[in-house]
Image (spheres, rainbow, N blue to C red):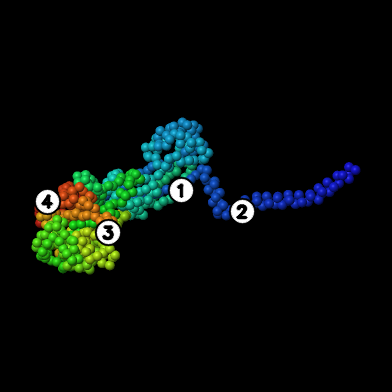
Amino acid sequence: MATSTTFPQQQTLRQRLPIVVLGLIAASLVLAFRLLSFQFPLDAETQAYLNNLRDSGYSRTLQLATARGNIYDRHGEAMAVNTLEYRVGISPALISDPRETATQMAAIINVSELELFDLMNQDVPWVQVAANVSADQAAGLRSLNLDEITLDTVPRRSYPQGPVAAQVIGFVAGDLRGYFGVEGHYNSQLAGEVRTRRVSNIPFEVPLIDFEQDRGKDILLTIDRDVQFVVESELISAIDRYDATGGTIIVMNPRNGDILAMASFPSFDPNTYDTADARVLTSPAIGQQFEPGSIFKVLTVASGLETGAVTPDFTYNDQGSLGGACEGIRNWDGGARGVVDVTQILVQSLNVGTSTISTRMGATDFYSMMGKFGIGRLTGVDLEGEQAGQLPTPGDPIWNEKNLCTNSFGQGVAVTPLQMLTAVNAIANGGLMMQPRVVYQILDGDEAIPARTANLGRPISTETAGIVSEMMVAVVNDGLDGAASLPGYSIAGKTGTAEIPTPIGYEQGTSIASFVGFFPADDPQVSILVKLDRPAEYWGSQTAAPTFRQLAERLVILLEIPTDDVRLALQAQGGSVNHIRR
């Protein structure tokens, strides 16, 4: 009976045993194949994943920028240089006393003790604790002699002159890219190549990083640091004196387009650009348009003479206002002047006079001449953020026949300060208009590459330029009661007082006060534009002209420009005044 009861179980076992054996054999084959497969080459994606997994425990990837080129003024004074900051990390596994280490580090860097303590208790091979640590703080950390602390060098931009010429230079942000000004426009030349590098997390393996390898090119500016400082101080003084809301002053060499100084207020310090109002990061001298008012009249007079619409001896009967297409045009004081010649149009700043000239020229010639002076077009200055201005012409939806009159005295047309001074420079430079520039040389190692000088055309002849210059001298001598005069020097200039347009008309009781001029008038060494926004005293003759005079008094000393008598005596003896400091 016992045998008969166990027989079915044995039979079942014998029936299932081959299946079990086959299963074991199959599993063994699969395992054997998998073991053999580890000897086969892996696909690229899998290999890369495993490599990253292997390396993540003891190394990390850094983006390393090479040294950026330095920026210097025209005399070699440093305006933008490189400094080093440090990225601080710790290896938690190496820390024997997290509380004590956190206390020591918190006393040196700007990270709380509690935050440091939490980082030190993380289960990771390495963790960053601070991104921007100064050299002094890094030295303090090194003095702790703690192997668990790592210090990676990080290049940063520094501006030793602080806010001086900030809007000309621009700044370099945390991404190591230049923004605005020279830093932005010449970013590709200044920036070195960014390199990718794996750096060990093991504190005993100190990486050697050469930031000078493949460094960027240095740049030498046309800007004179000392002139820039004087201009900025005079601008701030004028804004304070006349209770203006802002302003701009530009100083140039009209012969070659070099910008010696360009200042606007308000401005910023590029060392702390991240705390500045975004509206002041770009220069109003190139990026802010304004109606120029009466300083524009010199271009109208020059154009009328050049096209033959008027001659220097031309006269007309000024009745104080005009009718017809120029209905509503009146002189600044509404007064009639009687018989007036072209010089007196500028001396007395007569709107009726310039309107008479522009209508005699006709729209085609007038707007053609304004185009030749660069109005409504970019100057091409080597800075980021330039605006082209606005010059409505016949055929534009906003143009009407009256614009031919109002445009003649700088109303209904918009320019940038640099655009306006560049146009006037054509008068100072014998009719040849030079493109403005802020870079003098690019230094690539031992090679000095001069920046290109370019002329923007000849809007007027040498003869016309000389005639208008003499008229501008008469403006300063006879029309401003000495407000812009400088004893010993012949000054050519013109004031401007412009209303401020709004979407619903012009602001009441406010103005843009300006003065543009150059000296010595017969051999210009510098040209200057002064612009003050909403000064308490309305007229340019009361604010901008005296500011020009005070600045000129300092510049003739700083730039060693001799008086007219001395200059002419030197020239008579065969001497030269073309090698003075500028």
Q: Amino acid at mark 2?
A: Phe
Tell me if residue 23 can be seen: yes
Residue lying furthest right in this view? 1
Mark 1 secondary-structure assignment: strand
* Mark 2 or 4, nearer chain start: 2
Where in the figure is residue 279, as x and y percent of width and height? 32, 49
| Residue denoted by label 1 | 197
Of tags 4 and 1, which is closer to the observer?
4
* Mark 1 or 3, nearer chain start: 1
Of tags 1 and 3, which is closer to the observer?
3
Q: Residue at x 14, y 66 (%)?
A: 310
From the viewer's side, name the closer residue of 299 and 252: 299
| Residue denoted by label 2 | 40
Q: Residue 389 — which label?
A: 3
Gap in angstroms between the C-alphas marked 2 and 1: 30 Å
* Mark 3 or 4, nearer chain start: 3
Rendered view: 477 above or below 136: below
| Residue denoted by label 4 | 482
Please identify the quarter of the rendering in which residue 472 is found.
Answer: bottom left
Mark 4 secondary-structure assignment: loop
Of tags 2 and 4, which is closer to the observer?
4
